[in-house]
Amino acid sequence: MPPLTLTILASVLHMQGADATITSDNKGIEELLAPIRDQLQQQQADPSEPRIIEATKNYSRQIHSKGVYERSGYLKSNISAGSTAVKPASGTAVKPVGSSSGGHR
Amino acid sequence: MAMLPEFPDSPIAYLLVKVATRCNIDCSYCYWFRDKSVYAKPKLMSLTVLSQLLKRMEEQITRFSLPDFLLLLHGGEPMLWGIDNFHYIGKECRAIAARTGCKIELSVTTNGVLIDEAWLDCFEQNSIQVTLSIDGPAHVHDIYRRTFQDGPTHALVESAVQRLQARGIAPGVLAVCNPAHYPKEYVDYFVGTGINTFDIMFPDATFEDNDPPHLAKFYCDLFDLWLEANRDKRTINIRSTENMVAGLLGGSSRTEEIGYGPQEVCTILTDGSMEPLDVIRIAGDGSTTTTFNIFDNELEDIKIEPHWKAARDASLNLCEKCRQCQFVLACGGGYLPHRFSKHNGYDNPSVYCDDLYAIFSHIQSVLGKHVYVSKSSGEKIGISEAMAEQCQLQPSPNRVHAR
């Protein structure tokens, strides 16, 4: 299979019917699919969002560090499906920040 | 070629804080001391610098109404800064959180050799997340991670793990890959030590290094181990492997080292200097040196600093080979520092490009056998088959091309 993007995945699922979803028989892969399913569901639930969204509008990264395990920052919780731009209280546009680092010590 | 996403501007909400520039052990592969300019910096961050840093942080939180902020205390060996300073920064961060409503997370990445009961109290009282550096079992770890007297350090770090676990603290664990050994040696050691969440990172290298190691077999085998371990039940989490898998499934990487996205780290040195990603130091002396500092500059100013801006731009403006690659989103050109050459700067694929391509190819081929489109009727169609159907019926402009 070629690498998936949300665009491709949404299109594949759309062709397979409204009840189609992506799953795995491996628990590790299944867990990694969960947030992807959530994103796809969010888009379907919000009629203002296009059904098949562009990868450019959904590709997000969370702040994560080479030195820190798992950080789900405010960006994660505030990202709306279909857009990388979110508005904090100040009204300043914020995007999902990319990487952050600190090396192996 | 896949479309590359855009990443608009966002406020700095994470700082890599070098509270100590020296270390208490002597790891031969350490990137930090490859740039000798580090010796020109104060050994430890002073209270004056810390106070200014906290002031800048609060300004930033207030200005952008940030709901959370991360400080990663780093070095050198950050615990050389002293337990009183850790307690102090913890107290001050709680005060800022109370004033602003911002959730401030404190983390430390350490070699662990100084951890004792008093430090455990400190971590608990100040809610400091701990990440330890352990290169797997002793016979692997002690090759590179030595004392200044050339003694081993593994027993000291293992003792730290046991102390943390006895307190109910599950540390994050980071190792560096030594492909002369099998990934199973790492995995068996970590699992046997009760460490189920860890990462094994690529050794840092640039095109100026002679013969970077071949990593493909190690990481393909590591993925196979991860897959088998998680077949029926979630048992281990290997960060780099999972980020590669997530990227190939259309998800997002949770680390800077893999996956397409901007490099936006702001590093604060012991004298208050503001620099880009610290690992860029492997490009040589002065490669991260700036004139910006927290006394003269606000945190947001880092975005106009030439080295920082160059790193961010380079992380998004990939070379032609990367842009044409089918794995561009999942890979992102690898880790930015690994793309450096004196001739081209960062306008290169990763020095590990061939390895990355082989690793992604392997993972992708396996994923095709384990991912399905499922329907409520119970019907399951292999993802490859479903994609083939889709391609026949509706050719997609986003379909990837082979490299």
Image (cartoon, coloured by chain):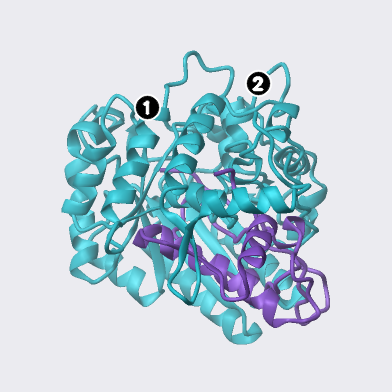
Quadrant where the C terminus of chain B is found in the figure = top right
Chain assigned purple: A
Q: Is residue B4 above or below residue B378?
A: above
| Residue B355 location (% of width, % of height) | 49, 28
The count of marks equals 2
Report the side of B400 relative to B184 (left or right): right
Q: Amino acid at mark 1?
A: Ser
SS type, badge 1: loop
Report the side of B213 relative to B339 (left or right): left
Q: Is residue B249 visible?
A: no
| Residue B119 location (% of width, % of height) | 30, 64
Q: Earlier in the sequence, mark 1 or mark 2?
A: 1
Name which quarter of the figure residue B145 lies in: top left
According to the image, label 1 marks what residue? B28
Residue B341: mark in rendering: 2
| Residue B243 location (% of width, % of height) | 50, 51
| Residue B173 location (% of width, % of height) | 34, 52
For the residue pair B186 and B162, the one nearer the viewer reads as: B186
Mark 2 Cα-neighbour bin, 10 Å: few <14, some 14–19, many ≥20: some
Q: Is residue B7 above or below residue B218?
A: below
Q: Are marks 1 and 2 in contact (CB under 8 Å)?
A: no
Q: Say which of marks 1 and 2 sits in front.
A: 2
Q: Amino acid at mark 2?
A: Ser
